[in-house]
Structure formats: C-alpha cells, structure tokens
Image (cartoon, rainbow, N blue to C red):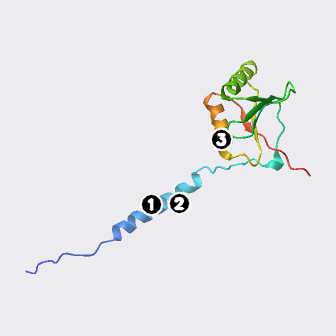
Amino acid sequence: MRQRRMMNQINVVPYIDVMLVLLVIFMVTAPMLPSGTVDLPSVAKTSQAKRAPMEIVVKGDDDWTLRDRDTQKDAVPVDKEELIARLIDAQRKDPEKPVVIAADKRVRYEAVMKVMDLLQRNQIAKIGLLVHPVEK
C-alpha cells in the first residue's frame, strides 16, 4: 500500500465557482440600482432670490458684516454673538427669510466654512452662497 503525499498546491476551482456566481449576481442587480445625478450650481445659471435675504459679508477670519436687503441699510460690522442674535430674530419674524454668505476670492475657504458651520449649529435655515452672474 502506497502512502499519499501531501498536496502543496491550492485548489482554485471552488474559488472560481464562487466568483462566477458573484459576477452573475452583480450583473443582474446592477441595472436595478437607481442612478443618482448631481446638479452642481453654475455661476451662469443663478436664480434670483424670491425674498430679500440677509447678507453676511466675510472679509476675514472674524471680520463679518451683516446687511438686511429688505431695509436697504448699510452693512454693519458684527461679532459672532450679535450675528446669531440678529439672524435668529429675523428668522423668528419670517421663517422663510434666506441667509446668504458673500466672500471675496481672496478670503480663505476656512473662514467661509466657519461662518456656515456657526449658522448650522444655531439652526439657521435657508443658508446659501452669494454668487455674481457672469456679465454677457
């Protein structure tokens, strides 16, 4: 009687079978998945606001001014607490009042995101970024 020697190779046939089954499953289910589209905003396709917004102008890290376009008054410099207090008061009077953030190209992205984060943490609704349409 002969002794069997240990086999030192991997049997890949079962792995190929599993891979083919998975391939068939993915091929059948892939067309059923909903495809999502992302419509990114374009400067050429800006829409006009239906209501006059509150405008926050970011000039630096903590250098902000606030202007209410309803009253057409000049922009007033505000600090963090005053900004939040005025915006909460304005949205208490009119919950649909939009808030837009305007910043120059030279202002750091971090400064704009700091303002946006501050507004979101204080439950300010309808936040947008102000863009200037391209002149034709």
Residue at 69% from the left image edge and 46% from the top image edge? 108
Furthest-top residue in this view: 93
Which element type, helix, strand or loop, lies under badge 1? helix
Q: CA distance from mark 1 to mark 3?
A: 43 Å
Quarter of the figure that contains the N terminus: bottom left
Amino acid under label 2? Met
Q: Residues within 10 Å of mark 1 (few under 14, many from 20)?
A: few
Q: CA distance from mark 2 to mark 1?
A: 9 Å
Q: Residue at x 63, y 33 (%)?
A: 118
Which residue is outermost to the right? 136
Residue ID for mark 2: 27
Residue reaching furthest left? 1
Nearer to me, 99 or 2: 99
Would you name the residue on which mark 3 appears? 113
Residue 58, relative to residue 32: is it above or below? above
Residue topped by disc 1: 22
Is label 2 in a helix, a strand or a loop?
Answer: helix
